[in-house]
Amino acid sequence: MNIYNIDLNLLVAFDVLLREKNVTKAAGHLGITQPAMSNSLKRLRTLLNDPVLVRTSDGMVPTERALILAPKIRQILLSTKDALQQVDADFIPEQSKRVYRIMASDYAASTLLPKLLEQLSTIASQTTIDIMTPSDVTFRDVEDGKIDMAINLFNELPQSFHQKVLWRDSFSCLTRVDNPVLNDFNLASYLASKHVWVSKTGFGVGLGMNPKDVQKLGWVDEALARIGKHRDIKVFTRNYHVAMQLAHDAQLIATLPSKAAEVHKADPAYAVLAPPFDIPDIELKMIWSPLLHHEPSHIWFRQQVVSAAQLC
């Protein structure tokens, strides 16, 4: 095969087709017509001497060869984009008007970002921060460099991402200062209380929670399950601030990362206590695309995030 005769746009089409597994959706992603996308698929089949996608009762399914080629072609596209991306070698923070787009859970937003913004206001006052929620973006958005970074508590990450642990955090219990449970706070009184649950806040729009599905409930309930216990969850929320407010207004107990609980530590209306059982520490991570790894303005910004994290 003579690579000089290959239309490199077909590699882009291949990548999108393998991801969408639907000609119409792939066409929409690339901003072309459905017939044009069908023609690209036809040309790919001729080029590779392989059907690439096969129609089944479950929709379009990739062939074995297409699945083998997919990660290789994806890497070619990432490398090409990295090589051609314009780099501002003369980046000057004081003069920069760059907009940095960050996906951050509200745990990260309420603990880390105030310190970061305070820091930026003195050394790069013309920069702008666009904060997005986990449901706003996907891993693909980060991988493509559409999002500068994601800051969250991650369970699993694609190997292609760069990552850095910003801090490790323990857990604390937050409730109203006049909650009767404080008279004798132990495992038995904790389990006899009503609780508000707050999510791990991963990527994408989540589904409803089931109190019996311990594996999906996260760190606190998994820790309880290890000692054969479970708590009485009355409210599920995806927002740490909502959880903290409910801990006050409804006399519930919110068990959440300590740095989040400490937001209310100085408020006399709240009590912050150590959980009466062991919960493993968690890690707040910053992840970013290899496409942005060598960009001077991004290197500088990552340094600012790390510096701000050390102040929290």
Image (spheres, rainbow, N blue to C red):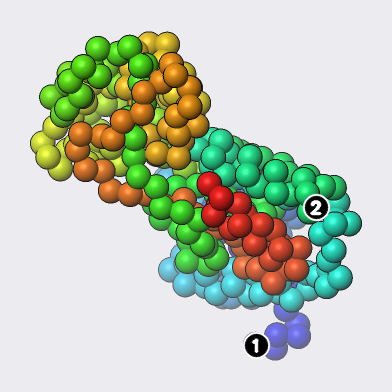
Type of amino acid under label 2 = Ala
Location of mark 1 (residue) = 1
Q: Furthest residue to the bottom?
A: 2
**Which residue is located at x 30 percent, y 13 percent?**
179
Location of mark 2 (residue) = 124
Q: Report the quarter where the N terminus lies.
A: bottom right
Q: Is residue 106 left or right of 178 when viewed as pictured?
A: right
**Which residue is located at x 69 percent, y 72 percent?**
294
Residue 297, numbered label: none
**Which residue is located at x 86 percent, y 70 percent?**
90
Circle 2 or circle 1, nearest the eye: 2
Q: Secondary structure at mark 2?
A: loop
Give percent across and percent down for residue 287.
Answer: 55, 58
Query: Are the residues flagged by discs 2 and 1 in contact, CB closer than 8 Å?
Result: no
Few, some or many residues within 10 Å of mark 2 (<14, 14–19, 20+): some
Vertical order, 78 against 37 (above or below): below
| Res. 274 image quadrant | top left
| Res. 279 image quadrant | top left
Few, some or many residues within 10 Å of mark 1 (<14, 14–19, 20+): few
Give percent across and percent down for residue 202.
Answer: 47, 43
Q: Is residue 7 left or right of 290 when viewed as pictured?
A: right
Of the image marks 2 and 1, the number of the one nearer the N terminus: 1
Give percent across and percent down for residue 227.
Answer: 12, 40
The front one of 246 and 273 is 273
Q: Secondary structure at mark 1?
A: loop
For residue 214, say whether it is visible. no
Give percent across and percent down for residue 301.
Answer: 69, 58
Type of amino acid under label 1 = Met
Vertical order, 219 against 66 (above or below): above
Cα distance between the residues tagged 2 and 1: 52 Å
